[in-house]
Image: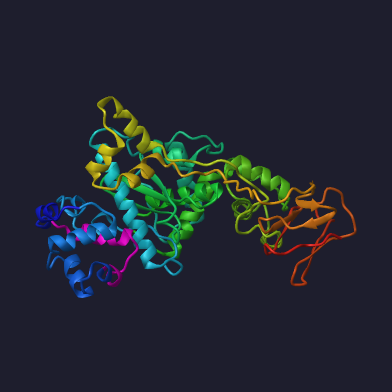
Amino acid sequence: MSVDLARAYAGLFDRFRLTVAREFAALTKTELAARIGVTPAALTQYESGNSRPSAATLVKLSLTLGQSIEFFAADGQRDRLTDHGRAFFRSLRSTRQLDRSRAEARAFFVSEVADCLIRRVKLPELTLPKDLHIGDDTSQETIERRAEALRSHWGLSGSPIPNMVRLLEVHGIIVTRCTVECAGVDAFSRWFRPGPIVVLNSTKSLDRLRFDAAHELAHLLLHADVEPGNKVLEDQAHAFAAAFLMPRSVIREQLPQRFDPFRYGHLKRIWGVSVQALLRRARDLRRMSDATYRRAMITLSQMNERTNERSFPLPGTERAVLLRKALEALEPQSYTIHDLAAEARLTESFVRETVFDDEEARPTIRLDAMEPPTEQRRSGDYIMRGGERMAKKTHTVSFIAKKPTETPVKFKTSDGEVVKFDAMKPQPQRVRFQAKDKPKGR
């Protein structure tokens, strides 16, 4: 990397871009200062604008933060990230400031990519109504009506929404997914110069990702003033998401009044929301009493399904395509991903990941070539080897009773713990084992 180039850009140094690059790298000022060989006080001076780094220090910053020399030059567009308002975050207590800053830095980078494309391509117009804001004391009924009003404004019937991410993009909202930078952060949204951006955590299951998208839509639609971590606003956004994804005029009569795992699992596949969200909706619409709702949630806990609902799979994924379509529209002009990265002054790998949203969503199969061949057959959802039941290598054993029997299925782990599956229950039951465990059959 040329020091001469750094000298040319040193006079254009932008303190804000240093801060956002450091936050994207998830480094504190002390950590970054140590890596480039300056004092924390000196780095603070750089970020406050009281002094500028030398050309040699700028080269170190570029190498350490993984950004080009050109990245750190001022563009005259903004002085700090908060010039575009604050982000809607969920609970501030459960999220580290370092994680929130990193996720916001990613959203800023996405806005830079979108800004470059918008200068060349006309993206869908933002069609969010501006007269649906609510206050802290807004009733549940008003929120239901806001959800119905937006469905009507967007020309949606009462049927399930097939693709929530695509719906947001069609109506002018930029959506991006991230994994590494959002590891400790739920979905969030914020406004930038190109318009609103929704950032979704791609490690979430499809039903949670769809609900998160609707939740962030609620913030953009209902809340004019951002108060990160405000429980009242979060509860309102949650209620709106449920009403928007599951309109009461249609869903109410479909919800069973008692918890039937198979029927609720079927509704999950139809409406694209979790079983827990369906149960909560049944309670809120008074199809299910509070006591019945509590018992249903206890049953889910006993089934070990409160976290990921593996017994109620929702296959598929929803990818963002808006930015990719914009880039494809520029292909006749020979404008490539390389040109876009250069214009945005970001790494090509980041721009490619953002535009193509090409994270591999399918599960990866890994085979052990050294494992000796054994005769095995499946019984229920556990493996049989030589007549002996063994725990799966996924560390999870599942059992679904095909025929009721009074004799429970027992497993004994290596530490002596005995786990029983009640064969009288038709719903899926799960238990986790260590990899070394070798459960014995009944």
Asked whether residue 227 is in view, the answer is no
Which corner quadrant of the image does residue 247 belong to? top right
Q: How is the image coloured?
A: rainbow
Q: Position of residue 381 (x, y in %)?
A: 75, 50
Q: Position of residue 363 (x, y in %)?
A: 57, 46
Q: Is residue 334 above or below residue 146?
A: above
As drawn, the residue found furthest toward the top would be: 332
Q: Is residue 94 left or right of residue 420?
A: left
Does the stretch in magenta take in 24? yes
Q: Position of residue 245 (x, y in %)?
A: 53, 44
Q: Position of residue 100 (x, y in %)?
A: 37, 62
Front residue (pair 192, 16): 16
| Residue at x 30% of width, y 52% of height | 108
Front residue (pair 363, 94): 363
| Residue at x 47% of width, y 45% of height | 147
As drawn, the residue found furthest toward the right would be: 406
| Residue at x 27% of width, y 46% of height | 112
Front residue (pair 436, 14): 436
Asked whether residue 30 is in view, the answer is yes
- Range of magenta residues: 13-32
Does the stretch in magenta take in 37? no
Quarter holding the C terminus is: bottom right
Q: Magenta stretch mostly in which secondary structure?
A: helix
Query: How many numbered dots are placed on residues in this image?
Result: 0
